[in-house]
Image (cartoon, rainbow, N blue to C red):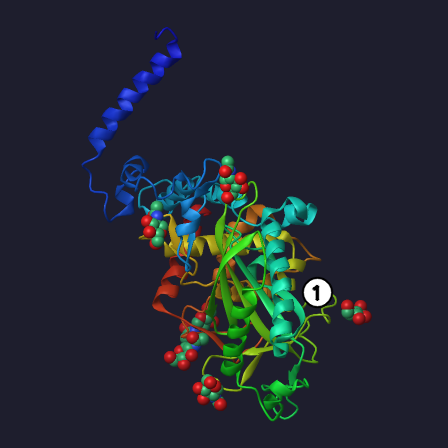
Amino acid sequence: MLRNPSVLVMLAISVVLLAFLIEAKPVDTSSNPCHTTNVEKKWNEGPLKHKRVIITNGTEVLNLCNFNTTEKNICLPDFEEWKSIHAAWHCQGKSVITLGQSIFHYLDKHSHSREQCDKSPSTCNWCRVGKDVEDYLNLLMDNVAELCPLFTTDQLVQTGSSAEKTNIFRASEFDHLAILKHFSQSPSDPNEIIYTGSDPVTLKYANGPVNASELLNLFRKCITEAVELVQNDVLSSPKIILGRTGVTIYFIHGGRYPLEPMKISVDLSIGVKIAQQPPVIWFMKNNSNNDVILVPQRPDAGSQWRLTYPTLERDMLLRADASVGRVYQLLKFLAALHHSKDNIEREIPRKSSLTSYVLKTCLFSYMRRNYRPEEATWYAKDALHHAVGVLGHFPLNATEMTSFFFKDRVEFNITLESKQAATEIIAMLNRINP
Ligand SMILES: *[C@@H]1O[C@H](CO)[C@@H](O)[C@H](O)[C@H]1NC(C)=O
Ligand SMILES: *[C@@H]1O[C@H](CO)[C@@H](O)[C@H](O)[C@H]1NC(C)=O
Ligand SMILES: *[C@@H]1O[C@H](CO)[C@@H](O)[C@H](O)[C@H]1NC(C)=O
Ligand SMILES: *[C@@H]1O[C@H](CO)[C@@H](O)[C@H](O)[C@H]1NC(C)=O
Ligand SMILES: *[C@@H]1O[C@H](CO)[C@@H](O)[C@H](O)[C@H]1NC(C)=O
Ligand SMILES: *[C@@H]1O[C@H](CO)[C@@H](O)[C@H](O)[C@H]1NC(C)=O
């Protein structure tokens, strides 16, 4: 029967592998990720957790990883590749010669690509999921306007990493801002808003400043009711959580070849547009069409709202060369990799100690000194070098970090964890790219 020599070779290899597995099994695999090999780890993984299983009928094959991921987590794609990058990054003594290359190889597959997206948006899966979300939200806001005229929107603005085309790992987070039609900036206090509509039911808002937490609570109620009325084949199982400046809705995106079904989170904030010019940005010829928006401050800030430039932040990344966004994606990846030091699970938290906001602020500060598109572009081969430069703007010796646009606004309290992350990532980048 075994006349084919290649079958014999395979058999021999299997016997050797089996012997190796039996040999390797007793090693402690519990705590230190550096003491486990891929083979042993596979051996220890739950049999079902990340395998494809057949649900209901033979045709519907779903990946449980995508469904069982908890809200605050993200399920890593290409886990084996991530694990080998993780080992090379965190384990002393592993060679780092090809680490940079491995990271870019992973990022090329698992990050939103500006180049591809600009060239042919219809083939960009990240944009396609974004379009599904946008279509859904447009329907949702139509229903909201019917149910609660108070929240009639003038415009739905895309913000955040999906709008910047800088998201990594999976197309699973989307941010939108609903610009409310019937409110405007108060003439007596620039940080307050007033109701300008004429709905008799809501006229109680006519007299004086609008309390942000009260309005947010109402918004959540209206969204919860409106969600019931939206029929959508692609997004299902909405779960609504009240956030700081709006609501977060979690959905299951039904997938679309080659994307697998997955859990996604959609942030929907509320804001009020005001008549003011945004600041001039040195490399943008004309940004006078960018919005200046008041958004709820904090849950306990009463009627004080705060100024933001959501579309300006977005457009600074979209109008800069794609290589700039690439450096930002690299830094997000490294922040996640560092944050997962003691975690070799396939699920990692969405947020790292160096948040995207912190990284973006450092990036803008670095760009202000080093980004002059008319003089020279940023080359892809210099991405690691630029990443070190960007992290150099993290205020290691300070206790707080202020906004790029508002110098007296504290956006982030510097924690010990975030300092260690910045320091260690810089040190490692200098080892990889001496
Ligand atoms: C998925 O999550 C549900 C609910 O938490 C749990 O009952 C189920 O066992 C999980 N399935 C797997 C394969 O982990
Ligand atoms: C299996 O389920 C899917 C979706 O629920 C359905 O579209 C399909 O017709 C089902 N197939 C069979 C053979 O029942
Ligand atoms: C800048 O853009 C705005 C809106 O797009 C336009 O109205 C204005 O004319 C532009 N200004 C210049 C100097 O190009
Ligand atoms: C705003 O509303 C919240 C919740 O309803 C309430 O606790 C708070 O006292 C209000 N703040 C002001 C300044 O009215
Ligand atoms: C903090 O760091 C900045 C640059 O990173 C430097 O200019 C400044 O002198 C430092 N301040 C102190 C108190 O060390
Ligand atoms: C920073 O810490 C202070 C004091 O604990 C707190 O009042 C403030 O809200 C924090 N700021 C941020 C942006 O987390």
- Going by the image, does 198 lie left or right of 91? right
Image location of residue 8, percent across then percent down: 34, 12
Image location of residue 120, percent across then percent down: 69, 45
Residue 345 appears in the figure: no
Circle 1: is it few (<14), some (14-19), or many (20+) Cα within 10 Å? some
Q: Is 186 located above or below residue 35 in the figure? A: below
Residue at 23%, 46% in the rendered image? 30
Image location of residue 309, percent across then percent down: 62, 72
Q: Quadrant of residue 152?
A: bottom right
Residue at 50%, 47% in the rendered image? 261
Establish whether ligand 3 lies closer than 8 Å to the Cβ of label 1.
no
- Going by the image, does 414 lie left or right of 236? left
- Going by the image, does 348 lie left or right of 209? left
Q: Which residue is mark 1?
A: 284
- Count of numbered marks: 1
Q: Residue furthest left?
A: 26
Residue at 20%, 38% in the rendered image? 27
Residue 50 appears in the figure: yes
Task: Name the amino acid, label 1.
Answer: Met
Quarter of the N terminus within the rendering: top left
Name the residue nearer the viewer: 113 or 146.
146
Q: Is 317 located above or below residue 155 in the figure? A: above
Secondary structure under tag 1 reads loop
Q: Is 74 located above or below residue 160 in the figure? A: above
Name the residue nearer the viewer: 241 or 337.
241
Q: Quadrant of residue 349?
A: bottom left
Image location of residue 407, percent across then percent down: 54, 78
